[in-house]
Amino acid sequence: MSSQSKSPELPEWMGAEVDEYCAWIEKVMTPYPFKHPDNLEDYICLHQNDYLRLSQRSEVRRAKIEAIEMYGNSYLASTVFTGGKGMEEHQIFRVKLADAMQSEDTILASSGWAANVGLIEVLAKRGTPIYLDQRAHASLWSGAQCSQGRAIMVRHNDPESLERRIQRNGAGIVCIDSFYSNTGSVADVAAYVDICERTGSVLVLDEAHSFGMLGSGAGGLAVEAGVAERVHFRTVSFSKALGGHGGCIAASRQLIWFLTHRAHSIVFSSAVLPCDSAAHSSALSIARAEPWLGRNALEMGALLRQELSQRGIDIGTSGCQIVSLELDNEQLACDFYRILVRNGVVSSVFLSPATPLGKGLVRFSTHSQLKAEEIVRTADACATAMDELGLARAEKQKVA
């Protein structure tokens, strides 16, 4: 970018908000904490969503390279227009996805975000109640905001709270995550299915963090719970267990056909590239053939909860490969991150809008290649950070 180039100044009504936010974030994050070390070889890396470590598998890389050589960097048209070079890669992957998820059909989207936003936007008519778990993925909330429906917040991971709100406001669209990305909480999917069936509501289950991790054929939490055929819509992000980019919606063939022609984020976006579908298909084959990858990641999450608990560190409600420490403010989260890096551990830091305003969160994502001794070192680094920051530790916490 040219040092002489200059952009126009924003009008005061907008510029004031931008200036205020930039000043706040600079103050909180000085020195800037999210630039990870350039060389991560000597670090325990718990900051990525590549849970099964498939992004660098030779089979996945080879499948993508071969597809690029065969089809080029295309298919540059909307999913509405079927056929053409490379479309068979999408079809192979869609069939494999549907089989894994025990669904009639699937449709691909450019991201998990696009899948959720496009789905909620088209489902909710004017005034339709949209019941959203307060910790549900931001894309579900954004879908509600883009729709003509009425967003109603439901207490986190609380089916009884949902039932009370439906009794008060009527049947609607229920949006929950399977594994929650902030807390690591695991939804009681069967309970939500029962409520939706009793009340005539539609269930949207975001399986971004559970797909590929568990379930027969790596199909996710709904498959594991035996309720896959009773969930109206399931969405997936391929940037987690499959180690790629893109997303999908799983539903009946009729509903997928409807979404193909009505969901704005799909109709008005270029279709997923054939090379991505080829890579995702290869990754899914590995996840299904090697179920121990998901089990290892989940077992390391359980071990991390145990080790943190033994050191008197609150693990919240985590029950999967996502383990988070919620802190009282953003600065504490940033300082916690810096101490971890100094002790050889790289985590993620969540600030507003990913957390409630004024709160900070440090998140660990365990993966299939972790070793027990690395988990112990991570827990020790957390204990060091707690002590250096003067944060109270309990004698022992109950492991979830």
Image (cartoon, rainbow, N blue to C red):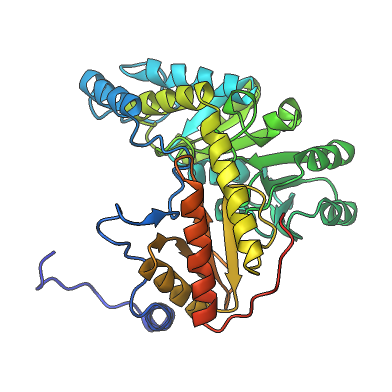
Q: Is residue 64 left or right of residue 256?
A: left
**Could you say where residue 85 lies in the image, as x and y percent from the top left?**
30, 17
Where residue 31 sits, quadrant-wise, is bottom left
Examine the rendered structure and indicate whether residue 32 appears above or below residue 180: below
Examine the rendered structure and indicate whether residue 32 appears above or below residue 291: below
Q: Is residue 107 left or right of residue 103?
A: left
Q: Give whichever of 317, 106 is nearer the camera.
A: 317
Q: Residue at x 57, y 78 (%)?
A: 358
Q: Is residue 120 visible?
A: yes
- The image shows a total of numbered marks equal to 0
Q: Give whichever of 186, 355 is nearer the camera.
A: 186
Q: Quadrant where the C terminus lies?
A: bottom right
Q: Is residue 165 left or right of residue 281?
A: right
Q: Residue at x 50, y 69 (%)?
A: 351
Where residue 183 sits, quadrant-wise, is bottom right
**Could you say where residue 277 lies in the image, as x and y percent from the top left?**
39, 26
Q: In this view, which residue lies farthest toward the front? A: 373
**Could you say where residue 353 lies in the image, as x and y percent from the top left?**
53, 67
Q: Residue at x 72, y 46 (%)?
A: 187
Q: Is residue 183 visible?
A: no
**Could you say where residue 393 lies in the image, as x and y percent from the top left?**
64, 76
Q: Give whichever of 159, 220 is nearer the camera.
A: 220
Q: Quadrant where the N terminus lies?
A: bottom left
Examine the rendered structure and indicate whether residue 96 appears above or below residue 78: above
